[in-house]
Amino acid sequence: MRSIGYTVESAVADVIDNSVAANASHVEVLFSSAGPFQVAVIDDGDGMSRDEAVAAMRLAATSPTTERRPEDLGRFGLGLKTASLSQCRTLTIASRKDGDLTVLRWSLDHVIASGEWSLIELDSTEASDLLGWDQFAHESTGTLVHWGDLDQLRMSAGDEQSDFDRVAVEVREHVALVFHLFNSGDTVRKIGFKLNGGPITPIDPFLSTSLKTQQTDWEPIEIDGQRVRLKAYTLPYLNKLSAVERTKALKLGGLRETQGFYVYRGGRLVIWGTWFRVAPRSEMAKLTRVRVDIPNSLDHLWALDVKKSTAAPPPLVRRRLSELAKTMMLPSQKVQEFRGRKVNQPAKVDHMWDLRLNGDEFSYEINIDHPAVQAFTADLTDEQREQFELVLRDVETTFPFVDAHNRMSGDKVPVSADADEELLKRATESWAHVRSSGFELETFIRSLAIAEPYYQVSNFERRLREALTQ
């Protein structure tokens, strides 16, 4: 049972599930700042009577078929025990309800020594050295879950304090993501989360508060009299985000790896970054993230595991997801195909690069009819123009396709276009170069106004005309 496969982060999250189910308004995770290593989770929830605490420490205390309250994040009645003992040899819970305090402990060493599943009961004096006890003692109701003798955690993370501190940071990030709806009060009851006294800032994987993020309406799916809801989000292209927003967007990893469905059970994120094999991960869909809200009453259909970290949609939902997936990916494709272009661009734009298609093959060629190229070659001799075009062909054939693809796939951000002032300055200098070659001023201005990148400059024609006629 210790080898179900919990990580430290998922184990802590499983303990917090009990705090959410207990109607806590504040939950704090504590990591000891000096040895011996200890972890504690404290909440101000309803607390438990002695009988309830004993039941909570019993393995498989609740059947998975038992109907649960909508906000109950439990499933098999195993989470508190299996999650905790996956990291430690000594699990202690202290709970206060109606003024009565109960402290119970599972010690694997005691179980081995006694040869039986013997639960230890402690008094407040014996429990007073637990991490977080002083803080818990001031709560009128609530529960303290304490991990001692962290053998498995030390084995996986390391024995140094720096290793333990790193794990604490990873736990903070995991809690910030998994419980972000509770942390922000988005569609569920608001809960404050802390780690070692510092507030945990929620990580919103959808950048839903950004005006640049595209959102669809909720799409309901009815199944067994219950409702599953879907809502698609299309993240902005990275070069359209501020540095802070870009960090948030990449918090979970690369965009390609984190696209797909994000499944929430009772407001708690249980699985993310998968298309459930209804669609492949693709570069063009990497900005798509789809929120899927499911009630805990459909657990049996979603094949939710003990850790609440894997799930599989039932056939009816899978079919509907498959139907909707391509539609939900379209905005991502459009964002990437048209990134950097103005919404109200001219009907015809003279692009600097022309795309050439030949079956499955493609190439890019510099558009020699582009006004900037024409202006540069206006006063060249035929021989000089031919030599210049040979140079352009060399540039085309050495375009670094693979390197550019690798960098873009790794979510590197290309340098944005020059500022309007720089483009206007460049156009003014170009006119100074070609004005003696027979170009008419108005023809020159109008041709640049529909040419890349000048067409993106706000009020380009008027501003360039003013600059050239002063």
Image (spheres, grey):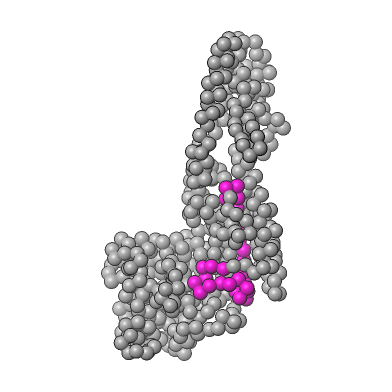
Is residue 297 toward the left or the right of residue 416 in the image? right
**Residue at image coords 30%, 78%:** 129
Q: Work out whether 100 lies above or below 357.
A: below
Instruction: Reply yes or no: does residue 302 show up in magenta.
Output: yes
* Residue 51 versus residue 408 in the image, above or below: below
In which quarter of the view is residue 117 placed?
Answer: bottom left
Where is residue 436 shown, x and y percent of the image?
60, 9
Is residue 182 among what the camera can see?
no
Q: Is residue 300 magenta?
A: yes
Name the residue nearer the viewer: 32 or 88: 88
Q: Is residue 69 visible?
A: yes
How many numbered dots are placed on residues in this image? 0
* Residue at x 37%, y 63% (from the top left corner): 167
In the rendered structure, the answer to whether residue 170 lies left or right of residue 438 reads: left
- Which residue lies at the image location 56% right of the left edge and 43% below the top edge? 240
Q: Residue at x 58, y 64 (%)?
A: 263
Q: Which residues are magenta?
A: 283-311
| 331 or 194: nearer the viewer | 331
- x then y, percent, for residue 13: 47, 69
In percent of width and height, residue 147 lies at: 36, 75
**Figure check: 116 above or below 325:** below
Point out the image quarter for the C terminus. top right
Work out which quarter of the rendered image holds the N terminus and state it: bottom left
Quarter of the rendering containing residue 172: bottom left
